[in-house]
Amino acid sequence: MMLYVEAVLLALAMGGAMALAIHLQNRKLAEIRRLLSAAELEFRRIRVESDHPKFRLSGRSAQILKRVEHAAGQEVSQVPEEVSIHYHVRNPHGEYFFIIIRSDEPPFIKHMSQQSAKAVLRDRYIPPPEPGA
């Protein structure tokens, strides 16, 4: 009888631990989704103005060629405090930009040379349109 009671208590303890782990994982995933959604909205709001139309950029019309998500706090029990999304995008004029959107900082935006874009994107690289085309 004592063995049975110990087995039941052990099963209940294991079930509780598993339920807690599942709860923490679900909480972490929900927070990651919330932070990624906010970062995606921030990306869509990006506007880079320039005197030369070739170097203008809008998050709404940019062609996303590469997107990588990062979440700080990879431990199962940790809810991330920060996420970032790294984008390699192309504007309608064939110019490339590297963008980092973080949940806790303003966006980082850098124009990329065609050579750098080709090295990073490899088979996803699209040459710029021919002049006059």
Image (cartoon, rainbow, N blue to C red):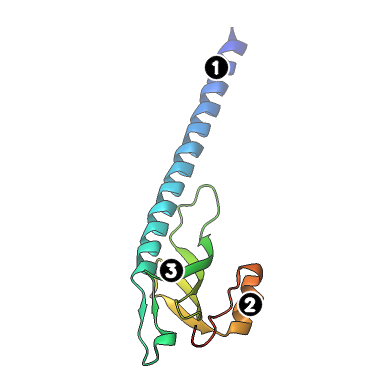
Front position among marks 2 and 3: 2
- 31 relative position to 16: left or right: left
Quarter containing the N terminus = top right
Residue 102 disc label:
3
Q: Is residue 11 above or below residue 123?
A: above
The residue drawn where x is 54% and y is 84% is 130
- 70 relative position to 61: left or right: right
Front position among marks 1 and 3: 3
Q: Residue furthest top?
A: 1
Instruction: Give me the C-alpha separation between circle 1 and circle 3.
Output: 47 Å
Q: Name which of mark 1 and mark 2 comes first in the sequence.
A: 1
Q: Nearer the viewer, residue 66 or 61?
A: 61
Q: Is residue 8 above or below residue 63?
A: above
Q: Name which of mark 2 and mark 3 comes first in the sequence.
A: 3
The residue drawn where x is 47% and y is 65% is 84
Helix, strand, or loop for circle 2? Answer: helix
Residue 70 horizontal/vertical position (percent): 52, 61
What's under tag 3, amino acid-wise? Arg
Instruction: Give me the C-alpha separation between circle 2 and circle 3.
Output: 25 Å
Q: Is residue 19 above or below residue 110?
A: above
**Within 10 Å of the Cα at label 3, are there few (<14), some (14-19), or many (20+) other Cα atoms?**
many
Instruction: Give me the C-alpha separation between circle 1 and circle 2.
Output: 61 Å
Helix, strand, or loop for circle 1? Answer: helix
Residue 110 horizontal/vertical position (percent): 49, 82
Q: Residue furthest bottom?
A: 51
Residue 118 disc label:
2
Residue at which label 1 appears = 8
Helix, strand, or loop for circle 3? Answer: strand
Picture quarter containing residue 43? bottom left
